[in-house]
Amino acid sequence: MPKSASPTLPLPWTGDDYECGFPFTLLPGLTMMAASNTIREKPNWWERYKEPTVADRWKQELKQVGIGDTP
């Protein structure tokens, strides 16, 4: 088969459901989103994050569930 006549394979990140392709996110970005969601689920987080004792406790909670650990 001539090189110009070879069929092209579809890309895995494009198709009928995606107009511009699938926007992938790297693991650090997913980890940051998970940490942000965990904190924002807490009541009155926007007032309490400024308190050092609360912020330290939240950091410990994130470490216990495996968020925020660096290799």
Image (tube, rainbow, N blue to C red):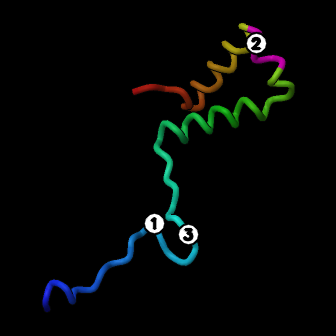
Q: Position of residue 64 (x, y in %)?
A: 59, 26
**Residue appearing at x 76%, y 12% in the figure:** 50
The mark lying in front, picked from 3 and 1, is 3
Instruction: Examine the residues drawn in magenta and state their main secondary structure.
Output: loop
Q: Earlier in the sequence, mark 2 or mark 3?
A: 3
Three-letter amino acid code of the residue under disc 3: Glu
Q: Earlier in the sequence, mark 3 or mark 1?
A: 1
Residue 58, label in figure: none
The mark lying in front, picked from 2 and 3, is 3
Residue 19, label in figure: 3
Residue 13, label in figure: 1
Q: Which residue is mark 2?
A: 50
Give how far apart the Cα atoms at labels 3 and 1 are.
10 Å
**Residue appearing at x 14%, y 92% in the figure:** 1
Residue 15 vs residue 49, the one in the foreground: 15
Three-letter amino acid code of the residue under disc 2: Lys
Q: Position of residue 5 (x, y in %)?
A: 21, 89
Q: Farthest residue toward the top?
A: 52
Residue 44 vs residue 8, the one in the foreground: 8
